Image (spheres, rainbow, N blue to C red):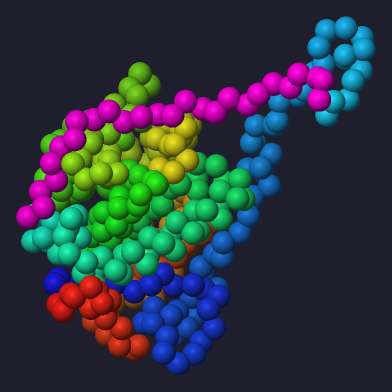
Protein backbone atom coordinates (compact mmCIF):
# COMPACT_ATOMS: atom_id res chain seq x y z
CA UNK A 1 0.00 0.00 0.00
CA UNK A 2 1.56 3.32 -1.00
CA UNK A 3 1.67 6.47 1.06
CA UNK A 4 -1.27 7.78 -0.95
CA UNK A 5 -3.56 4.89 -0.20
CA UNK A 6 -5.64 6.44 2.59
CA UNK A 7 -8.06 8.90 1.02
CA UNK A 8 -10.54 10.93 3.09
CA UNK A 9 -14.07 11.81 2.10
CA UNK A 10 -14.73 15.07 0.32
CA UNK A 11 -14.85 17.98 2.73
CA UNK A 12 -18.14 19.80 3.01
CA UNK A 13 -17.89 23.43 4.07
CA UNK A 14 -21.29 23.44 5.71
CA UNK A 15 -20.72 20.45 8.03
CA UNK A 16 -20.91 21.38 11.77
CA UNK A 17 -17.98 20.65 14.08
CA UNK A 18 -18.32 17.61 16.31
CA UNK A 19 -16.36 14.75 17.84
CA UNK A 20 -15.28 11.96 15.52
CA UNK A 21 -14.77 14.20 12.48
CA UNK A 22 -12.43 13.19 9.67
CA UNK A 23 -9.03 14.83 9.26
CA UNK A 24 -10.16 17.06 6.44
CA UNK A 25 -13.17 18.23 8.46
CA UNK A 26 -10.92 19.03 11.39
CA UNK A 27 -8.44 20.77 9.08
CA UNK A 28 -11.26 22.81 7.58
CA UNK A 29 -12.35 24.03 11.00
CA UNK A 30 -8.80 24.75 12.12
CA UNK A 31 -7.81 26.73 9.04
CA UNK A 32 -11.18 28.49 8.81
CA UNK A 33 -11.57 27.37 5.19
CA UNK A 34 -15.34 27.69 5.23
CA UNK A 35 -15.06 31.26 4.02
CA UNK A 36 -12.87 30.20 1.09
CA UNK A 37 -14.76 27.28 -0.42
CA UNK A 38 -17.72 28.14 -2.59
CA UNK A 39 -20.88 26.31 -1.70
CA UNK A 40 -22.84 24.68 -4.53
CA UNK A 41 -25.16 27.24 -6.03
CA UNK A 42 -27.16 27.96 -9.11
CA UNK A 43 -25.32 29.13 -12.16
CA UNK A 44 -25.03 32.90 -12.79
CA UNK A 45 -27.99 34.51 -14.49
CA UNK A 46 -25.94 35.38 -17.56
CA UNK A 47 -25.34 31.67 -18.17
CA UNK A 48 -29.08 31.03 -18.11
CA UNK A 49 -29.70 33.92 -20.48
CA UNK A 50 -27.20 32.44 -22.94
CA UNK A 51 -28.95 29.08 -23.05
CA UNK A 52 -30.96 28.45 -26.23
CA UNK A 53 -34.59 29.43 -25.98
CA UNK A 54 -37.37 26.95 -26.58
CA UNK A 55 -38.51 26.94 -30.21
CA UNK A 56 -41.45 29.21 -30.94
CA UNK A 57 -44.62 27.35 -31.83
CA UNK A 58 -46.31 28.66 -34.95
CA UNK A 59 -49.69 27.62 -36.29
CA UNK A 60 -50.19 26.02 -39.65
CA UNK A 61 -50.87 28.14 -42.72
CA UNK A 62 -54.29 29.83 -42.80
CA UNK A 63 -55.93 32.50 -40.63
CA UNK A 64 -57.84 30.12 -38.35
CA UNK A 65 -54.84 27.95 -37.53
CA UNK A 66 -52.60 30.94 -37.04
CA UNK A 67 -54.92 32.35 -34.40
CA UNK A 68 -55.23 29.05 -32.53
CA UNK A 69 -53.59 28.90 -29.08
CA UNK A 70 -50.19 27.20 -28.84
CA UNK A 71 -51.48 24.50 -26.49
CA UNK A 72 -54.26 23.43 -28.88
CA UNK A 73 -53.70 19.71 -29.50
CA UNK A 74 -54.65 20.19 -33.16
CA UNK A 75 -51.75 22.57 -33.71
CA UNK A 76 -48.61 20.80 -34.85
CA UNK A 77 -45.64 21.57 -32.59
CA UNK A 78 -42.04 21.02 -33.64
CA UNK A 79 -40.41 18.08 -31.93
CA UNK A 80 -37.10 18.63 -30.20
CA UNK A 81 -34.49 16.40 -31.77
CA UNK A 82 -31.84 15.06 -29.42
CA UNK A 83 -28.25 15.86 -30.42
CA UNK A 84 -26.42 13.07 -32.18
CA UNK A 85 -24.31 11.13 -29.72
CA UNK A 86 -20.58 11.55 -30.26
CA UNK A 87 -19.07 8.08 -30.15
CA UNK A 88 -15.40 7.34 -29.58
CA UNK A 89 -13.94 4.77 -31.94
CA UNK A 90 -10.37 4.53 -30.69
CA UNK A 91 -8.72 1.13 -30.60
CA UNK A 92 -9.01 -0.62 -27.24
CA UNK A 93 -5.42 -0.46 -26.03
CA UNK A 94 -4.47 -2.76 -23.13
CA UNK A 95 -3.83 -1.05 -19.80
CA UNK A 96 -0.79 -2.40 -17.97
CA UNK A 97 -2.27 -3.95 -14.82
CA UNK A 98 1.15 -4.73 -13.37
CA UNK A 99 2.12 -1.09 -13.66
CA UNK A 100 -1.09 -0.07 -11.90
CA UNK A 101 -0.38 -2.51 -9.10
CA UNK A 102 3.22 -1.31 -8.72
CA UNK A 103 2.08 2.28 -8.32
CA UNK A 104 -0.58 1.45 -5.77
CA UNK A 105 -3.50 2.24 -8.07
CA UNK A 106 -6.86 0.52 -8.31
CA UNK A 107 -6.58 -2.61 -10.43
CA UNK A 108 -9.70 -3.44 -12.47
CA UNK A 109 -11.02 -6.96 -11.99
CA UNK A 110 -8.97 -7.11 -8.76
CA UNK A 111 -10.12 -7.71 -5.21
CA UNK A 112 -12.08 -5.09 -3.30
CA UNK A 113 -9.54 -3.10 -1.30
CA UNK A 114 -9.64 -0.22 1.16
CA UNK A 115 -8.40 2.05 -1.62
CA UNK A 116 -11.25 1.05 -3.94
CA UNK A 117 -13.83 1.56 -1.20
CA UNK A 118 -12.51 5.04 -0.41
CA UNK A 119 -12.76 6.12 -4.05
CA UNK A 120 -16.20 4.56 -4.38
CA UNK A 121 -17.35 6.99 -1.69
CA UNK A 122 -15.59 9.92 -3.37
CA UNK A 123 -17.05 9.16 -6.82
CA UNK A 124 -20.56 8.77 -5.39
CA UNK A 125 -20.45 12.27 -3.92
CA UNK A 126 -19.17 13.66 -7.22
CA UNK A 127 -21.92 11.93 -9.20
CA UNK A 128 -24.58 13.22 -6.80
CA UNK A 129 -23.25 16.76 -7.23
CA UNK A 130 -23.23 16.30 -11.02
CA UNK A 131 -26.89 15.29 -10.91
CA UNK A 132 -27.69 18.42 -8.88
CA UNK A 133 -25.92 20.59 -11.44
CA UNK A 134 -27.90 18.99 -14.27
CA UNK A 135 -31.11 19.89 -12.47
CA UNK A 136 -29.81 23.47 -12.34
CA UNK A 137 -29.46 23.44 -16.16
CA UNK A 138 -25.67 23.56 -15.99
CA UNK A 139 -25.48 21.68 -19.29
CA UNK A 140 -22.23 19.92 -20.16
CA UNK A 141 -20.43 21.65 -17.27
CA UNK A 142 -22.20 19.25 -14.92
CA UNK A 143 -20.29 16.36 -16.49
CA UNK A 144 -16.82 17.89 -16.06
CA UNK A 145 -14.59 17.54 -13.00
CA UNK A 146 -11.20 19.23 -12.56
CA UNK A 147 -8.56 17.58 -10.37
CA UNK A 148 -5.78 19.88 -9.20
CA UNK A 149 -3.55 20.65 -6.23
CA UNK A 150 -1.62 23.66 -4.96
CA UNK A 151 1.85 22.21 -5.67
CA UNK A 152 3.43 19.23 -7.48
CA UNK A 153 3.82 16.00 -5.55
CA UNK A 154 0.55 16.21 -3.64
CA UNK A 155 -1.12 13.34 -5.51
CA UNK A 156 -3.45 14.96 -8.06
CA UNK A 157 -2.64 12.52 -10.88
CA UNK A 158 -2.83 9.57 -8.50
CA UNK A 159 -6.30 10.67 -7.35
CA UNK A 160 -7.48 11.50 -10.90
CA UNK A 161 -6.49 8.02 -12.10
CA UNK A 162 -8.12 6.21 -9.18
CA UNK A 163 -11.27 8.28 -9.50
CA UNK A 164 -11.50 7.49 -13.22
CA UNK A 165 -10.89 3.78 -12.62
CA UNK A 166 -13.58 3.70 -9.93
CA UNK A 167 -16.03 5.65 -12.08
CA UNK A 168 -15.47 3.36 -15.09
CA UNK A 169 -17.05 0.54 -13.08
CA UNK A 170 -20.43 2.31 -13.16
CA UNK A 171 -22.95 0.22 -15.10
CA UNK A 172 -24.83 3.11 -16.72
CA UNK A 173 -22.10 5.64 -17.43
CA UNK A 174 -18.61 6.01 -18.83
CA UNK A 175 -15.65 8.24 -18.07
CA UNK A 176 -13.19 10.16 -20.22
CA UNK A 177 -9.89 10.89 -18.46
CA UNK A 178 -8.18 13.95 -19.96
CA UNK A 179 -4.48 14.67 -19.47
CA UNK A 180 -4.56 18.47 -19.18
CA UNK A 181 -1.09 18.76 -17.65
CA UNK A 182 0.35 19.94 -20.95
CA UNK A 183 3.85 20.70 -19.63
CA UNK A 184 4.32 17.39 -17.80
CA UNK A 185 1.80 14.80 -19.08
CA UNK A 186 2.02 11.44 -17.33
CA UNK A 187 -1.28 9.56 -17.78
CA UNK A 188 -0.22 7.64 -20.88
CA UNK A 189 3.01 6.35 -19.35
CA UNK A 190 1.24 5.42 -16.12
CA UNK A 191 -1.42 3.41 -17.96
CA UNK A 192 1.00 1.99 -20.53
CA UNK A 193 -0.82 3.61 -23.48
CA UNK A 194 0.76 4.80 -26.75
CA UNK A 195 1.29 8.49 -27.49
CA UNK A 196 -0.60 10.50 -30.07
CA UNK A 197 -2.44 13.76 -30.72
CA UNK A 198 -4.59 15.09 -27.93
CA UNK A 199 -6.50 18.01 -26.48
CA UNK A 200 -3.95 20.69 -27.35
CA UNK A 201 -3.80 19.51 -30.97
CA UNK A 202 -7.58 19.90 -31.22
CA UNK A 203 -7.35 23.41 -29.75
CA UNK A 204 -4.62 24.51 -32.14
CA UNK A 205 -6.04 22.93 -35.31
CA UNK A 206 -9.51 24.07 -36.35
CA UNK A 207 -9.85 21.13 -38.74
CA UNK A 208 -9.16 18.40 -36.15
CA UNK A 209 -12.07 16.63 -34.47
CA UNK A 210 -11.17 16.03 -30.82
CA UNK A 211 -13.03 12.70 -30.74
CA UNK A 212 -10.44 11.29 -33.15
CA UNK A 213 -7.77 11.91 -30.51
CA UNK A 214 -9.49 9.81 -27.82
CA UNK A 215 -7.82 6.49 -26.99
CA UNK A 216 -9.84 3.42 -26.11
CA UNK A 217 -8.76 1.00 -23.39
CA UNK A 218 -9.51 -2.59 -22.53
CA UNK A 219 -11.15 -1.37 -19.32
CA UNK A 220 -14.89 -1.12 -20.07
CA UNK A 221 -16.15 2.43 -19.71
CA UNK A 222 -12.71 4.09 -19.62
CA UNK A 223 -11.44 6.41 -22.38
CA UNK A 224 -8.32 8.58 -22.34
CA UNK A 225 -7.59 11.87 -24.12
CA UNK A 226 -3.84 12.63 -24.25
CA UNK A 227 -2.45 16.10 -23.60
CA UNK A 228 -1.18 16.38 -27.15
CA UNK A 229 1.44 18.68 -28.59
CA UNK A 230 3.59 20.83 -26.31
CA UNK A 231 3.34 24.60 -26.63
CA UNK A 232 4.38 27.66 -24.67
CA UNK A 233 0.93 29.16 -25.24
CA UNK A 234 -1.29 26.52 -23.62
CA UNK A 235 -3.13 29.05 -21.45
CA UNK A 236 -3.83 31.28 -24.45
CA UNK A 237 -5.31 28.39 -26.41
CA UNK A 238 -7.45 27.41 -23.42
CA UNK A 239 -8.69 31.00 -23.17
CA UNK A 240 -9.81 31.02 -26.82
CA UNK A 241 -13.43 30.60 -27.91
CA UNK A 242 -12.58 27.25 -29.54
CA UNK A 243 -12.09 25.61 -26.13
CA UNK A 244 -15.82 25.69 -25.35
CA UNK A 245 -16.66 24.07 -28.69
CA UNK A 246 -14.02 21.36 -28.27
CA UNK A 247 -15.14 20.49 -24.76
CA UNK A 248 -18.80 20.44 -25.78
CA UNK A 249 -17.86 17.88 -28.42
CA UNK A 250 -16.58 15.48 -25.76
CA UNK A 251 -20.03 15.03 -24.19
CA UNK A 252 -22.33 15.86 -27.11
CA UNK A 253 -25.36 13.58 -27.00
CA UNK A 254 -23.85 11.61 -24.09
CA UNK A 255 -25.41 12.88 -20.84
CA UNK A 256 -23.99 9.98 -18.82
CA UNK A 257 -20.37 10.52 -19.85
CA UNK A 258 -18.22 12.10 -17.14
CA UNK A 259 -15.02 13.96 -18.06
CA UNK A 260 -12.17 14.16 -15.54
CA UNK A 261 -9.34 16.64 -16.17
CA UNK A 262 -5.94 15.98 -14.61
CA UNK A 263 -4.70 19.58 -14.61
CA UNK A 264 -1.35 21.07 -13.58
CA UNK A 265 -0.90 22.27 -9.99
CA UNK A 266 -2.81 25.53 -9.60
CA UNK A 267 0.15 27.46 -8.17
CA UNK A 268 2.68 26.05 -10.63
CA UNK A 269 0.94 26.61 -14.00
CA UNK A 270 -1.94 28.75 -15.26
CA UNK A 271 -3.97 26.16 -17.27
CA UNK A 272 -5.73 24.98 -14.10
CA UNK A 273 -7.33 28.39 -13.57
CA UNK A 274 -8.41 28.54 -17.23
CA UNK A 275 -9.96 25.06 -17.14
CA UNK A 276 -11.86 25.93 -13.96
CA UNK A 277 -14.10 28.17 -16.08
CA UNK A 278 -15.46 25.15 -17.97
CA UNK A 279 -16.12 22.61 -15.19
CA UNK A 280 -18.94 22.11 -12.73
CA UNK A 281 -16.70 20.75 -9.95
CA UNK A 282 -13.09 21.32 -8.94
CA UNK A 283 -11.41 18.92 -6.52
CA UNK A 284 -8.31 20.29 -4.77
CA UNK A 285 -5.99 17.56 -3.49
CA UNK A 286 -4.64 18.34 -0.03
CA UNK A 287 -1.60 16.31 1.03
CA UNK A 288 -1.63 15.47 4.72
CA UNK A 289 1.18 17.14 6.69
CA UNK A 290 2.48 18.87 3.56
CA UNK A 291 -0.01 21.29 2.03
CA UNK A 292 0.17 24.64 3.83
CA UNK A 293 -2.78 26.84 4.67
CA UNK A 294 -1.50 29.76 2.58
CA UNK A 295 -0.96 27.59 -0.47
CA UNK A 296 -4.41 26.06 -0.11
CA UNK A 297 -6.04 29.48 0.15
CA UNK A 298 -4.22 30.70 -2.98
CA UNK A 299 -5.15 27.58 -4.97
CA UNK A 300 -8.83 27.86 -4.04
CA UNK A 301 -8.80 31.52 -5.05
CA UNK A 302 -7.30 30.72 -8.46
CA UNK A 303 -9.94 28.06 -9.11
CA UNK A 304 -12.83 30.25 -7.96
CA UNK A 305 -14.24 30.47 -11.52
CA UNK A 306 -15.67 27.02 -10.80
CA UNK A 307 -18.91 27.27 -8.77
CA UNK A 308 -18.10 24.21 -6.63
CA UNK A 309 -14.62 23.80 -5.14
CA UNK A 310 -14.13 20.85 -2.79
CA UNK A 311 -11.19 19.36 -0.90
CA UNK A 312 -9.86 15.81 -0.89
CA UNK A 313 -7.34 14.75 1.75
CA UNK A 314 -4.56 12.52 0.43
CA UNK A 315 -1.88 10.60 2.32
CA UNK A 316 -3.65 10.50 5.69
CA UNK A 317 -2.46 7.64 7.91
CA UNK A 318 -4.95 8.06 10.74
CA UNK A 319 -8.72 7.92 10.92
CA UNK A 320 -10.28 9.23 14.18
CA UNK A 321 -13.26 6.93 13.71
CA UNK A 322 -11.02 3.88 13.27
CA UNK A 323 -12.73 2.93 10.02
CA UNK A 324 -11.03 0.37 7.76
CA UNK A 325 -12.77 0.08 4.43
CA UNK A 326 -12.43 -3.20 2.57
CA UNK A 327 -12.30 -5.57 5.55
CA UNK A 328 -15.92 -6.52 4.98
CA UNK A 329 -14.85 -8.09 1.65
CA UNK A 330 -11.89 -9.93 3.16
CA UNK A 331 -9.16 -7.36 2.50
CA UNK A 332 -6.78 -7.19 5.48
CA UNK A 333 -3.98 -4.96 4.12
Foreground pick, 320 / 331:
331
Label count reads 0
Question: Is 261 in front, or is 135?
Answer: 135
Vertical position of residue 315 compared to residue 126: above or below: below
Q: Quadrant of residue 230?
A: top left
82 falls in the magenta region: yes
The N terminus lies in quadrant: bottom left
Query: At 18% from the left edge and 75% from the top edge, which residue is drawn?
Result: 330
Q: Is residue 243 left or right of residue 109?
A: right
Closest to the observer: 210 or 33?
210
Q: Nearer the viewer, residue 29 or 190?
A: 190
| Res 79 seen here | yes
Tell me the quarter of the image containing the C terminus. Answer: bottom left
Residue at the bottom extreme, as displayed: 19
Q: Is residue 274 visible?
A: no
Left or right: 54, with 121 as reference point:
right
Magenta stretch secondary structure, dominant: loop
User: Residue 112 in the image: x percent, y percent?
Assistant: 22, 66
Residue drawn at x 36%, y 29% as measured from the top left: 87
Decide if residue 295 is on the left or right side of residue 303: left
Q: Quadrant of residue 49?
A: top right
Residue 81 position, x and y percent, is: 58, 25
Tell me where residue 211 appears, x and y as whole percent. Answer: 33, 29
Q: Is 230 a magenta residue?
A: no
Give, as a single range, the part of the protein colored magenta.
Answer: 73-98
Q: Position of residue 4 (x, y in %)?
A: 21, 70
Q: Residue at x 37, y 65 (%)?
A: 122
Most extreme residue toward the top, as rendered?
62
Rendered residue at 63%/26% (across/down): 80
Amino acid sequence: MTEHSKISRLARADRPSRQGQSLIERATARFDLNSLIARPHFLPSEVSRNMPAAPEVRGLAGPEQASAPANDPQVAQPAKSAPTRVEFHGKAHPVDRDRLREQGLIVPEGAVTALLEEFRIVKRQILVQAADLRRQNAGAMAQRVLISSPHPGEGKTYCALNLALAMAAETESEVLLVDADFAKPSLLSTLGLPGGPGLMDALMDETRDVRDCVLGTDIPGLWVLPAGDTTNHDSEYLASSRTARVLERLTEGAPRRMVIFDSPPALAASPAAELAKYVGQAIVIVRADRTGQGSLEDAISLLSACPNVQLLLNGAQFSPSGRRFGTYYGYKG
